Image (tube, rainbow, N blue to C red):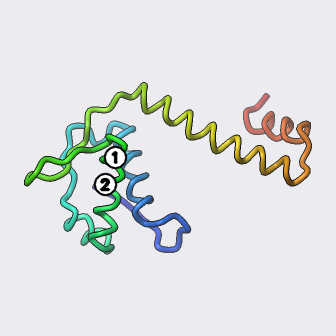
Amino acid sequence: MNIKISLLSSVPIYLQIVEKIKKEIINNKLTEYQLPSIRTLAKELEVGIITVKKAYEQLSAENYIYSRSGKGYFVSKIDFEQVHENTKKELNSELINLLNEYLQRNITKEEIKEIFNEVIGG
């Protein structure tokens, strides 16, 4: 597995790991795959074991991976429709926060619409 993390990023390392593995799973690059052990991935990324453990626990809580006692962590079968819906919900929430930030900074709705039209080409 080829995960690149940035020690200079404001995003915590364990979340970087979570997002990289999620992306690999969503892009069907890790189907029916056994993940590296926590120790192996920690050594490969040169991070602490607790960091990788926290990432795996987060992925497990979100049902992207599961563990088998004594065997390790594996990629779950993914309901891509549900992933798509969850992604839309997350992005909608982020967009609402961003739009509120625009409005709080006295950027008009017309200016926001112009920005949207530039981005989506409309």
Say whether marks 2 and 1 touch (CB < 8 Å): yes
42 lies left or right of 18: left
Vertical relation: 52 (above or below) 119:
below
88 lies left or right of 62: right
Vertical relation: 11 (above or below) 94:
below
Whole-percent x, y for residue 104 in the image: 85, 51
Of residues 33 and 61, the one drawn nearer to the viewer in this rendering? 61
118 lies left or right of 77: right
Q: Residue at x 89, y 38 (%)?
A: 109
Q: Residues within 10 Å of mark 2 (few under 14, many from 20)?
A: some
Looking at the rendered structure, the kind of residue marked 2 is: Glu
Of residues 121 and 88, the one drawn nearer to the viewer in this rendering? 88
Label number found at residue 110: none
Vertical relation: 119 (above or below) 68:
above
Q: Secondary structure at mark 1?
A: helix
Query: Looking at the rendering, in which quadrant would you find the N terminus?
Result: bottom left
Query: Looking at the rendering, in which quadrant would you find the C terminus?
Result: top right
Which residue is identified by label 1?
61
Q: Residues within 10 Å of mark 1 (few under 14, many from 20)?
A: few
Whole-percent x, y for residue 8 in the image: 52, 73
80 lies left or right of 35: right
What's the distance in space between the residues labelled 2 and 1, CA to CA? 6 Å
Looking at the rendered structure, the kind of residue marked 1 is: Ala
Whole-percent x, y for residue 62 in the image: 37, 43
Vertical relation: 59 (above or below) 11:
above
Q: Secondary structure at mark 2?
A: helix
Whole-percent x, y for residue 108 in the image: 91, 43
Q: Residue at x 34, y 49 (%)?
A: 59
Q: Residue furthest left?
A: 70
Q: Residue at x 20, y 43 (%)?
A: 33
Q: Residue at x 33, y 61 (%)?
A: 54
Which residue is identified by label 2?
57
